[in-house]
Amino acid sequence: MVGKSDVLGEQRRCEKDRGFALASPATLNRLELGAQFTDRYRKITPREGKDELIVLDFDATDDPLHGRQEGRFFHGYYAQYCYLPLYCFCGEVCLWAQLRTSDRDASEGTREALEVIVAAIRRRLPQATIVVRGDSAFAREELMAWCEAQRDIYYVVGLARNSRLEALLEPALMAARQKHCLIGGAASRVFKELLYQTRSTWSRARRVIAKAEVTAQGDNPRFIVTNIPEQGILKAEGLLLLEGRAETLYEDFYCARGNAENQIKQMTLDLKAGRSSTHWMASNQMRLWFSAFAYMLLERLRAWGLRGTVLARANLGTLRLRLLKVAASVTVSVRRIHVRLASAFPLKEVFLACQRTLACRVESS
């Protein structure tokens, strides 16, 4: 009736929407009245392709050394001699893998990396809104001031606790303790917004979101600093790209940065990103890049070729073991090399579907 051939929604652009039919009258009504709602359960806002929201997750980790290598330093936090590589991920895509010595601040070099990454994004998506996310190691004046000076670049980074912050949060912590007692000892949270400036290192006061949490183990105060306003990130015609309310920004957005740590684990454990055992840093950097390239190949294989299969959300180690390690018989003759894959391979249909999908993608490009 409306000229739509895919009435069941199997070919929808967003993966989370696939399999859902046309919108019901109630859904359309919520869209019409969306401006009247403030809670995320009833509010529906349109999304346009030109209004992209890109989240860049920065993180640093330890890369243990194997002897007296170039750039050898002892790191007190990790309690070992190590390198301190810097990573940046956009979702599950690795954008940056830089090997560094560990005698530095974990955020060092992040601004320079951002300049390169943002320039590349702007060439493809000039109207994109970019949000930088990281833990408390990245709450540095240089990085935050650079983001504030750019167009459509925001940050949400952790902030290490100190006595001044804890004193400002004390009333909220008291309320959380009372709530903790009233609900029978379950974890309780109270969120509070602060306008905070360090005594010497920050050039201005900034918006700090504090979480006053009390668990069975005791008080657990946490802080993040951001330049996202309370009304959120708004684009043309009032389109809401990202919620700015304290609780939503902390629990739904900031806490999701932990996914970048999962990507680093896959690179380190499954693709040998920690195999920096040569003497020279330059060759170890090359090994780190090789692991990053291998990660990208497998990540695109998973995103493009395995969509909708049982391996669509498998980690990269599982892909290597279950999809790529296939028993085969190889016969070499004068004219050709014959590779015969095992017909009893349990994931034969997944393998063939992936091959066909990737072949079609190559032909179309």
Image (cartoon, rainbow, N blue to C red):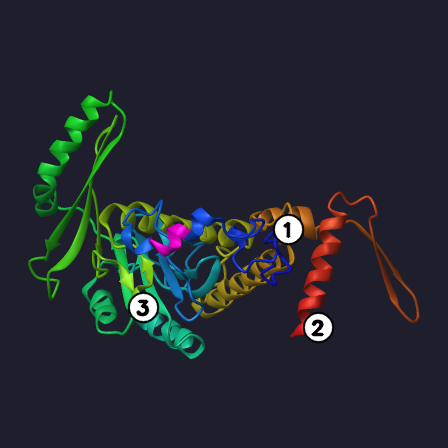
> Can I make out residue 76 in this image?
no
Upstream in sequence: badge 2 or badge 3: 3
- Magenta-colored span: 29-33
Asked if residue 32 is among those painted magenta in the image, a careful observer would answer yes
Point 69% across, 53% down: residue = 324
Residue marked by disc 2: 363
Residue 131: image tag: none
Q: Does 137 sit left or right of 294 as displayed?
A: left
Upstream in sequence: badge 2 or badge 1: 1
Residue marked by disc 3: 237
Residue 242 percent coordinates (x, y): 32, 57
User: What is the secondary structure assignment of the residue under circle 2?
Assistant: helix
> Can I make out residue 132 in this image?
yes
| Vertical arrangement, residue 247 with respect to residue 55, above or below | above
Indicate which label's residue lies in the foreground, 2 or 1.
2
For residue 54, which quarter of the picture? bottom left
| Vertical arrangement, residue 243 with respect to residue 71, above or below | above
User: What is the secondary structure assignment of the residue under circle 1?
Assistant: helix
Q: Nearer the viewer, residue 288 or 27?
A: 27
User: What is the secondary structure assignment of the residue under circle 3?
Assistant: helix
Label 2 amino acid? Glu
Residue at the top extreme? Answer: 184
| Vertical arrangement, residue 218 with respect to residue 279, above or below | above
Point 43% across, 47% down: residue = 26
Q: Residues within 10 Å of mark 3 (few under 14, many from 20)?
A: few
Upstream in sequence: badge 3 or badge 1: 3
Q: Residues within 10 Å of mark 1 (few under 14, many from 20)?
A: some
Residue marked by disc 1: 320
Q: Magenta span: helix, strand or loop, mainly?
A: helix
Tell me the CA gap for discs 2 and 3.
Answer: 39 Å
Residue 127 percent coordinates (x, y): 37, 74
Asked if residue 182 is among those painted magenta in the image, a careful observer would answer no
